[in-house]
Image (cartoon, helix red, strand yellow):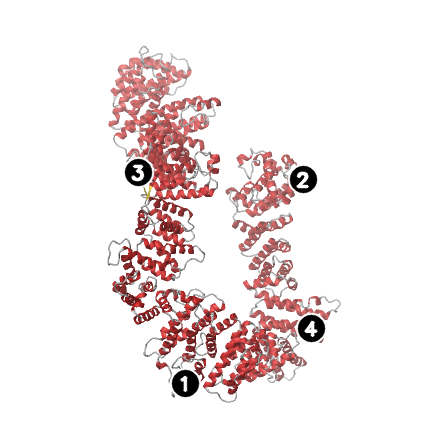
């Protein structure tokens, strides 16, 4: 049965599909037309039906125009079809099939072109029109989904799905139904799972790209990305990919590969890679894919295509690379660069293996194809070399793995053997030509892999031979096939040898004839020297034979020859040199390198006497000299010369070799090319050289010959130009600098220097001497350290000693010790050239050229420049340093006598006069050691034109002015002064002599020995002065110093203290007789004279200023001004100041102290001008900073002249404005914060600030200044001054500044047109300054002196204008804080400006979410509001309108206040105003805003939280219960005052009355009637919510005593108001029962009853009774009735459960209610009868009371019975009242029982009459009265039956009468009671 049902379902579903196809298009739409017309993409379904087609078409056309602006060609055609005017009347259901089909095709085309832009708003407009006009959401579902499916994770897709008909299970999109129900987008995981499970959906996704491309969509990147990611994701999701899935993907893949769309092609390549990673495809499929990818790749997709192919080769089982694919790859030139890039980042070994193998097969197959076909029709010959070329290029470009290369070589060998068997012999050369580049490339790049492949292949051949041989030995029945196999194996071996020979072509692999087993390469590097020599000869022969061959391996030849020229065997080198011109042609200039190498090695002791090597050097020198010198580069020329010069020196062991070398060079081109060697022919012709060639020379002859050589070299040097000659000397000295102790070149160079020093006497001499001293200084310092034990002693007296006894006087004498044969171990290397070095230094001391200006100088300066004077000083320092070092009088120093001899010579020739000596010695002890850590002048760099390098290596550094040197210089000075006469020594203390200042500098040295020796010198000078002669200033100064010699020797800083106490003008004590005023001034002026002199070295000036730094003297300041000005000017240039000059400037500026400023402020205007200039020096920031550091509070106070103080303040303000560095600006502000200013000075500066004129109109404010730049300066100046004022205790008499600040505030407000000028910040600063001033003069809110500031000077208007003008909350904060102070000081002024203040505060400050802003608000409210209210009451007597306006400001701002701060702000305002009196106003305003803006869209867009009713509840509950009830009562009273409906008033009249009407809490005129009703409802609802809240109940429970009683009285008032409101509402409800507002009145009435109910539950029984007692006395009848109804409800709910103390109040209420019920005498005056309804209610209350308490309190209810008797007896009484009275009597009969027996005659007859109802004729009244009478009769019969005998007949008659009439419910009970309860006798 199940199968049958399934078959039936299938038939039915197919039938339904057929019927659907046959149906008229659009009929289904017609069926649901009324329902789907509201379908919309843009609008809410409820609003969509209201939008007309005209509006939608206009909207759509607007969107189409926007789309056309993006792509006009794609959307232009649709404006005339889908969006035409005719489309508005188009009815799809009425069209034919053809028209509908064309429409569908147009819609599909449009949607496909729209898809890339579907997220734009313009596209949504067009889609909205298509949904409305053509129902595409029902008729074109597939196209619609195809358009938006790429964006399935957006809200747009969810909105589209909501429109689609998805409930049809036959629809392919039925699976989207859950998303339609939830209204959510389509998750990607869901889409992938569905595509994986439903192949049709996967096909749909794949076809989207082809459809888009076919439709001409321009931007398909998004669509391709979606389809690609979806397909890849589906493949990833699938656990097992079936053949069906692959077959569905292949059309999409193939179409994408063939497409010209790059994005599609790349996406398909990604899909192929993902597919290959998941499944193994058929080999044919893989090959086809590779072929198609290779064929369709282009330059844009080549990287991705090759990567995809490589991955397919790696992941699939592919045996061979497709031939067609290989052809396509080879024919595209851009493949190889891309392949290199891919191989660098990825491993593609498998791909390369397949490709290389295929290319090899294709290369070889070309020859086979050529053999098989004729040359005329051969197609293969066209590309016979292309494949091999590509293969070679690939091997050269890529680095292949070993396995790939080995496989390729094996394949190559196999293919070669196969080709040799198949090809004809005439094609074998072509095969070799084809394979040779390939083999050569493999051999060069992959030699080891190639060897491994050859080895494997050869082993296989050998193994095969062995197998065949073994088979031949075992059996004799071998056949011919075995013989053939053996022959083939041998043939293959021969072919392999031929193939290998192709890789070894070239000279490097040629076999050396003499060594038949070795190649040329191996022989050239053979260990045997003879083999290497033979190889060189073979190489020479090869070069000669292949001289004209273009393929000659030049690089190999060159490298081989250079290597052999540096060989260790002379025969090999000689063989290479024998090539002569061929060697030069091949090696060229590079042969200089082996020449220098060999010549340098020849200097070694082991080789210097080897004749073979000597011959090598001579031959090589001859070879080098065979070409012109110009053939070599300058660097090579220098190398040749430096290498040859050591070989020219004649030494005892090698003089013959040197003779040959000199003779060779003298006649060579090198002598012509090098001017230094140009005089060598004179050397050869000299007598001494001629004599040496005949006999063995002696040391004297050798020395003489070398002297001739050196002098001729010097003659050649002088022929050179000055620049070239000095560069050569510098080059030579730099070459021997490190090897001076053992270099033969050193002998040549030192001898050359000695000759040049003695022969050159001009400026050039300084450079030569400088180079010599610079070269020899380290060696001489080492020489000075040797002791006598280090010097080898001579065995014979005639033997020439190593060190001479005296300085040699000639070069020949200096060379003589070098010409003696000595054992090297007997002589220390440093002593070899000692005599020659001392000779050179002696020549320097003797022949050093002295500049003309050196004798005219007072001071010698440390050399810092390249001038002649500094060069000369540099040489002197180096000489004096080394000479003093070596002249130490130590017994063990070997060379001390030689150095002392040099020192005497130095002083004789260079320091002949006393001035030169003193200048040099003074330089030694005055120059600081730190400045001379290394020589500032490098003569080598100076000669070569290079800059000096301060970062010299550590080994080259030498402290020429160390402390040791200073001590030695002072020792010389002491000894020198001791040997001089007293008159000469006394002259040194004159004021014109700089000796005393120089010793003063030495006294500040940190070295104690320096200070002690300086003191000795000063003591000698001071003591040498004859007595009773006028003393000079320096003599007096020397006396002061000598008196404190002990302290100075112990402490280096004591000299500063001594001079401070001795020379300061401010010192009151005079410690010594010398220190009178004039002497002190004289000493200061003399010392400062050397400071200001230009010739004085700057370090001397610095030291003098250091020792005088603590001296406070006006003379010191005055004398130093020129020097300070010069330093200031120098600091402004780019070069700037040196460290010493900077320190001098610092010391000069530091002399402006509070002590000195007092001395110069009165008359030192020039001194002050210089200080001001330093302070204002913008180009010298350091001077500015130093001056700023000097300005302190005491400094400012020390300026006695007020003008100076004013000027300083002005300058500081200018600096604060114009400083270019942040450090200077910060320092200025720190200074301004430190000094204490006068108010007059600040006012004077404020008066300079001119921002604008008050008279300028706003339109002309911008033109008030010429340009914004001056105004910017003014504003910046104002900022500086305001920041000064803002600081506490920084300005004296600050109250004087307040009027000026208000004036500046007025100017600033006129400039509110430029945000970039910092308008708000200036306002804030001004307000803060005024506030600070006010707080200082009125700290507790009251002025200590009323005259400090007047009310007219405090402009509240300007403060308010700040609030109005600025939009900054911070400005508002400052203004409000200032107004707080103003409200305490001047409340009257603030009162008139209160509303603008709070209006703008509500608009800005309340919206800030920070604690400070809230604190400002609270403070403002606390301060301003009470003061203003008090002022308002004083002036007008009423402040209610002001309060309402103030409250409205806060309420209007409350939505913008941060939610967590709304309640505290309103609470604080209420507490300030008074909660009880104003909470109802706040609630009314809040609820009004809630009513007006609860659904305001604008507020929602602005992210403004509307005021909710819960907020109002929270506000009320935050108050005390008393205030809550009071506020709610007043709120309901206000509601009661509002009209029932909005009066219909004319608009014009409303506008007239608007100005006269006072401020209303809820404006009935401006709001609608609906808003009025809503306001009433929320007010009542708020009351109910507050009374029902737990917080309120908790607070009530916590109340005690008087508060409880007060609360009950408040409850009474609230209940009274509520009851009155209920009566009015009930009346309105009845009056509007048929109106549309009836529902509102019912809801309002229900809410009012809720309030009453809540009140009832809040009141205790006693309290409720008291309340009711008071309410029934109310003048309003409705209130009386409602109070009784409330009481009845209370009685009903309590069910009589009262305590004993609660009963008496209830009984008291009986009398009050009875008074209401009792009839009123019509004749009585002043009493009005109670309404029947009230009396009825009262009777019901009494009935309930009687039921509860009548049994126990019968006497209390007896008056009630009497009243009831009166009512039923009165014929004119209302039947309702009579009926209620009867019911009350019935209850009284129950509770009173026998107590009513006396009253039976009075009421039983009347009751029976009522039962018969003879008085009334209306049926309704009769029934009501009969029912009441029957009920009363029933109770009488039940409880008084024994006393009814007089009335039984009447009772029975009445009962029977009633029974005869209408059936009554109580009559059967009455009848039953008559028979059962009445005694039988009755």
Residue bearing mark 4: 430
Crowd tier of the residue under label 3, counting other residues whose Cα lies within 10 Å: few below 14, some 14–19, many 20 or above: some
Tell me the CA gap for discs 4 and 2: 72 Å
| Quadrant housing residue 315 | bottom right
Residue 1495 is situated, as x and y percent measured from the top left of the image, at 46, 34
Q: Secondary structure at mark 2?
A: helix
Q: Secondary structure at mark 4?
A: helix
Question: Which of disc 3 and disc 1 is earlier in sequence?
Answer: 1
Asked whether the residues under the numbered discs 3 and 2 touch, taking CB atoms below 8 Å apart as contact, a structural biologist would say: no
Quadrant in the picture for the C terminus: top left
Q: Secondary structure at mark 1?
A: loop
Residue 233 visible, this orientation: yes
Q: In this rendering, which labeled residue sits more in front, label 1 or label 3?
A: 1
Q: Secondary structure at mark 3?
A: helix
Q: In this rendering, which labeled residue sits more in front, label 1 or label 2?
A: 1
Residue bearing mark 2: 99
User: Any mark on residue 800, and which?
Assistant: 1
Query: Horizontally, is 622 left or right of 1681 in the view?
Result: right
Asked whether the residues under the numbered discs 3 and 4 touch, taking CB atoms below 8 Å apart as contact, a structural biologist would say: no
Q: In this rendering, which labeled residue sits more in front, label 3 or label 4?
A: 3
Q: Is residue 1453 above or below residue 760?
A: above
Residue 505 is situated, as x and y percent measured from the top left of the image, at 63, 76
Tell me the CA gap for discs 4 and 1: 83 Å
Work out which residue is located at the far front of the displayed protein and give it: 1029
| Quadrant housing residue 1037 | bottom left
Residue bearing mark 3: 1337
Closest to the observer: 670 or 1584?
A: 670
Crowd tier of the residue under label 4, counting other residues whose Cα lies within 10 Å: few below 14, some 14–19, many 20 or above: few
Tell me the CA gap for discs 3 and 2: 94 Å
Residue 449 is situated, as x and y percent measured from the top left of the image, at 57, 73
């Amino acid at each position: 049965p199940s199968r049958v049902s399934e078959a039936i379902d299938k038939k039915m579903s197919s039938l339904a599909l057929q019927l659907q196809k046959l149906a008229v298009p659009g009929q289904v739409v017609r069926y649901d037309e009324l329902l789907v017309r509201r379908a919309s993409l843009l609008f809410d379904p409820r609003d969509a039906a209201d939008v007309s087609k005209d509006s939608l078409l206009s909207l759509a056309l607007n969107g189409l125009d926007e789309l056309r602006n993006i792509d006009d060609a794609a959307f232009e055609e649709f404006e005339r079809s889908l969006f035409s005017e005719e489309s508005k009347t188009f009815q799809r259901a009425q069209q034919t099939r053809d028209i509908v089909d064309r429409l569908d095709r147009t819609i599909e085309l449009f949607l496909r072109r729209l898809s890339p832009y579907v997220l734009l708003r313009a596209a949504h407009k067009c889609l909205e029109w298509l949904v409305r006009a053509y129902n595409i959401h029902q008729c074109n579902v597939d196209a619609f989904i195809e358009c938006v499916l790429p964006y399935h994770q957006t809200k747009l897709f969810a909105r589209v799905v909501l429109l689609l008909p998805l409930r049809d299970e036959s629809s392919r999109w039925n699976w989207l139904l859950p998303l339609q129900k939830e209204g959510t987008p389509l998750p990607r995981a869901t889409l992938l799972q569905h595509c994986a499970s439903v192949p049709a959906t996967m096909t749909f996704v794949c076809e989207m790209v082809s459809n888009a491309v076919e439709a001409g969509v321009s931007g398909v990147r998004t669509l391709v990305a979606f389809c690609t990611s979806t397909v890849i994701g589906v493949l990833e999701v699938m656990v097992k990919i079936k053949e069906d899935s692959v077959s569905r993907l292949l059309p999409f893949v193939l179409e994408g590969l063939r497409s010209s769309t790059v994005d599609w092609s790349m996406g398909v390549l990604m899909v192929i890679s993902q597919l290959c990673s998941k499944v193994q495809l058929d080999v044919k499929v893989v090959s086809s894919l590779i072929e198609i990818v290779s064929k369709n790749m282009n330059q844009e997709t080549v990287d991705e295509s090759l990567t995809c192919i490589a991955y397919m080769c790696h992941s699939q089982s592919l045996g061979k690379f497709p031939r067609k694919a290989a052809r396509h790859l080879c024919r595209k030139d851009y493949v190889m660069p891309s392949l290199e890039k891919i191989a660098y980042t990825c491993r593609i070994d498998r791909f390369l293996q397949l490709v290389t193998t295929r290319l090899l097969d294709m290369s070889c197959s070309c020859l086979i194809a050529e053999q098989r076909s004729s040359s005329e029709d051969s197609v293969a010959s066209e590309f016979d070399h292309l494949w091999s070329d590509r293969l070679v290029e690939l091997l050269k470009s890529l680095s292949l793995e070993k396995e790939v290369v080995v496989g390729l070589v094996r394949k190559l060998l196999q293919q070669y053997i196969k080709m040799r068997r198949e090809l004809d012999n005439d094609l074998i050369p072509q095969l070799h030509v084809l394979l040779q580049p390939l083999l050569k490339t493999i051999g060069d790049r992959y030699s080891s892999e190639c060897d491994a492949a050859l080895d494997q292949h050869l082993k296989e051949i050998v193994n095969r031979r062995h197998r065949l041989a073994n088979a031949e030995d075992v059996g004799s029945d071998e056949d011919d096939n075995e013989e053939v196999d053996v022959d083939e194996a041998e043939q293959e071996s021969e072919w392999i040898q031929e193939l290998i020979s192709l890789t070894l072509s070239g000279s490097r692999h040629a076999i050396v004839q003499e060594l038949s087993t070795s190649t040329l390469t191996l022989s050239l590097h053979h260990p045997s020297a003879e083999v290497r020599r033979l190889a060189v000869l073979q190489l020479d022969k090869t070069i000669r034979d292949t001289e004209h061959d273009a393929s000659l391996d030049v690089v190999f030849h060159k490298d081989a020859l250079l290597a052999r020229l540096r060989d260790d065997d002379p025969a090999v080198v000689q063989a290479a040199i024998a090539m002569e011109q061929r060697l030069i042609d091949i090696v060229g200039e590079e042969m200089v390198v082996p020449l220098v190498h060999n010549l340098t090695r020849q200097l070694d002791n082991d080789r210097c006497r080897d004749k073979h090597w000597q011959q090598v050097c001579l031959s090589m020198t001859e070879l080098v000299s065979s070409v012109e010198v110009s053939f070599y580069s300058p660097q090579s020329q220098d190398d040749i010369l430096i290498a040859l010069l050591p070989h020219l020196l004649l030494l005892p062991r090698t003089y013959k070799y040197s003779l040959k070398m000199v003779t060779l060079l003298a006649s060579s081109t090198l002598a012509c090319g090098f001017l230094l060697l140009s005089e060598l022919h004179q050397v050869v012709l000299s007598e001494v050289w001629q004599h040496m060639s005949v006999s063995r020379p002696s040391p004297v002859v050798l020395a003489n010959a070398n002297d001739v050589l050196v002098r001729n070299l010097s003659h050649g040097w002088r022929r050179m130009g000055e620049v070239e000659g000095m560069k050569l000397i510098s080059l030579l000295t730099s070459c021997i600098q490190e090897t001076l102790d053992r270099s033969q070149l050193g002998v040549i160079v030192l001898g050359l220097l000695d000759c040049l020093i003695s022969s050159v006497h001009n400026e050039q001499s300084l450079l030569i001497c400088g180079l010599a001293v610079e070269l020899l200084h380290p060696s001489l310092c080492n020489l000075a350290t040797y002791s006598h034990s280090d010097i080898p002693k001579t065995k014979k007296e005639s033997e020439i000693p190593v060190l001479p006894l005296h300085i040699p006087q000639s070069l020949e004498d200096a060379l003589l010790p070098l010409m003696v044969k000595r054992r090297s171990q007997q002589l220390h290397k440093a002593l070899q050239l000692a005599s020659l070095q001392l000779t050179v230094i002696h020549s320097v001391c003797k022949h050093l050229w002295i500049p003309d200006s050196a004798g005219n100088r007072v001071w010698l300066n440390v050399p810092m420049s390249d001038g002649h004077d500094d060069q000369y000083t540099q040489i002197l320092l180096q000489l004096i340093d080394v000479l003093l070092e070596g002249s130490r009088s130590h017994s063990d120093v070997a060379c001390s006598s030689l150095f002392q001899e040099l020192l005497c010579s130095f002083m004789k020739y260079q320091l002949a006069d006393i001035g030169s000596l003193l200048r040099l010695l003074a330089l030694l002890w005055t120059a600081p050691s730190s400045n001379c850590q290394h020589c500032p002048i490098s003569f080598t760099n100076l000669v070569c034109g290079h800059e000096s390098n301060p970062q010299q290596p550590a080994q080259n550094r030498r402290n020429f002015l160390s402390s040791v040197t200073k001590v030695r210089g002072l020792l010389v000075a002491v000894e020198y002064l001791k040997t001089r006469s007293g008159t000469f020594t006394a002259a040194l203390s004159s004021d014109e002599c700089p000796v005393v200042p120089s010793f003063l500098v030495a006294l500040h040295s940190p070295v104690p020995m320096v200070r002690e020796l300086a003191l000795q010198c000063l003591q000698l000078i001071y003591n040498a002065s004859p007595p009773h002669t006028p003393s000079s200033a320096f003599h007096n100064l020397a006396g002061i110093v000598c008196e404190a010699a002990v302290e100075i020797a112990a402490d280096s800083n004591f000299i500063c203290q001594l001079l401070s106490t001795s020379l300061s003008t401010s010192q009151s004590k005079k410690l010594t007789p010398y220190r009178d005023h004039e002497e002190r001034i004289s000493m200061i002026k003399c010392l400062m004279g050397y400071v200001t002199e230009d010739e004085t070295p700057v370090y001397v000036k610095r030291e003098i200023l250091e020792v005088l730094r603590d001296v406070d003297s006006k003379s010191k300041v005055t004398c130093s001004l020129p020097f300070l000005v010069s330093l200031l000017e120098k600091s402004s240039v780019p070069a700037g100041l040196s460290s010493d000059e900077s320190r001098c400037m610092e010391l000069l500026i530091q002399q402006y102290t509070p002590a000195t400023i007092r001395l110069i402020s009165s008359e030192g205007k020039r001194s002050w001008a210089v200080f001001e200039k330093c302070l204002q020096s913008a180009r010298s920031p350091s001077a500015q900073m130093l001056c700023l550091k000097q300005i302190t509070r005491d400094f400012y106070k020390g300026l006695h002249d007020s003008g100076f103080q004013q000027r300083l303040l002005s300058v500081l303000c200018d600096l604060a404005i114009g400083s270019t560095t942040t450090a200077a600006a910060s320092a200025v502000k720190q200074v301004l914060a430190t000094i204490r200013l006068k108010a007059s000075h600040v006012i004077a500066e404020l008066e300079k600030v001119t921002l604008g004129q008050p008279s300028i109109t706003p339109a002309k404010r911008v033109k008030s200044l010429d340009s914004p730049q001056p105004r910017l300066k003014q504003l910046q100046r104002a900022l500086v001054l305001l920041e000064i004022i803002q600081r506490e205790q920084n300005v004296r008499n600050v109250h004087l500044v307040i009027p000026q600040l208000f004036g500046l505030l007025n100017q600033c407000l006129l400039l509110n047109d430029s945000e970039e000028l910092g308008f708000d910040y200036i306002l804030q600063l001004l307000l803060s300054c005024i506030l600070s001033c006010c707080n200082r003069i009125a700290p507790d809110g009251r002025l200590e002196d009323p005259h400090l500031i007047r009310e007219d000077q405090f402009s509240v208007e300007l403060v308010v204008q700040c609030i109005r003008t600025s939009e900054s909350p911070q400005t508002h904060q400052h203004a409000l804080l200032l107004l707080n102070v103003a409200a305490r000081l001047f409340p009257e002024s603030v009162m008139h400006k209160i509303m603008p203040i709070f209006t703008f505060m509500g608009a800005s400050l309340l919206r800030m979410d920070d604690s400070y802003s809230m604190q400002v608000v609270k403070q403002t409210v606390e301060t301003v509001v009470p003061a203003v209210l008090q002022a308002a009451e004083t002036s007008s007597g009423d402040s209610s309108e002001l309060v309402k306006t103030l409250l409205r400001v806060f309420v209007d701002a409350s939505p913008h206040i941060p939610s967590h701060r709304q309640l505290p702000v309103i609470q604080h305002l209420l507490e300030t105003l008074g909660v009880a009196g104003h909470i109802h106003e706040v609630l009314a305003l809040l609820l009004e805003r809630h009513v007006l803006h609860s659904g305001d869209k604008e507020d929602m867009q602005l992210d403004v939280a509307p005021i909710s009713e819960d907020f109002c509840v929270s506000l009320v509950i935050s108050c005390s219960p008393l205030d809550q009830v009071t506020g709610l009562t007043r709120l309901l009273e206000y509601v009661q005052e509002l009209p029932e409906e909005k009066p219909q008033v004319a608009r014009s009249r409303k506008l007239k009355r608007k100005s006269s009407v006072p401020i209303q809490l809820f404006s009935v005129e401006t709001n609608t009637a609906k808003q009025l009703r809503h306001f009433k409802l929320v007010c009542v609802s708020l009351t109910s919510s507050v009374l029902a809240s737990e917080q309120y109940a908790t607070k009530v429970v916590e109340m005690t005593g008087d508060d409880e009683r007060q609360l009950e009285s408040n409850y009474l008032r609230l209940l009274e108001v509520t009851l009155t409101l209920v009566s009015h509402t009930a009346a309105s409800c009845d009056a509007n029962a048929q109106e549309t507002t009836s529902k509102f009145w019912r809801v309002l009435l229900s809410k009012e009853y809720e309030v009453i109910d809540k009140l009832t539950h809040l009141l205790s029984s006693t309290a409720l009774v008291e309340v009711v007692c008071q309410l029934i006395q109310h003048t309003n009848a409705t209130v009386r009735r409602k109070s009784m109804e409330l009481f009845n409800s209370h009685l009903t709910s309590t069910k009589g459960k009262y305590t004993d103390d609660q009963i008496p109040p209830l009984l008291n209420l009986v009398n009050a209610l009875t008074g209401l019920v009792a009839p009123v005498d019509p004749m009585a005056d002043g009493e009005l009868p109670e309404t029947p309804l009230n009396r009825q209610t009262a009777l019901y209350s009494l009935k309930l009371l009687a039921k509860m308490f009548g049994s126990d309190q019968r006497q209390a209810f007896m008056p009630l019975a009497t009243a009831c008797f009166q009512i039923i007896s009165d014929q004119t009484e209302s039947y309702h009242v009579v009926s209620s009275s009867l019911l009350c009597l019935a209850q009284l009969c129950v509770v009173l029982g026998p107590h009513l027996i006396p009253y039976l005659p009075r009421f039983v007859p009347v009751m029976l009459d009522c039962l018969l109802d003879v008085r009334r004729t209306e049926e309704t009244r009769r029934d009501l009265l009969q029912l009441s009478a029957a009920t009363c009769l029933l109770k009488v019969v039940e409880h008084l039956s024994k006393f009814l005998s007089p009335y039984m007949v009447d009772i029975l008659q009445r009962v029977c009468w009633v029974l005869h009439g209408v059936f009554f419910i109580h009559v059967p009970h009455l009848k039953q009671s008559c028979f059962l309860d009445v005694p039988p006798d009755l």
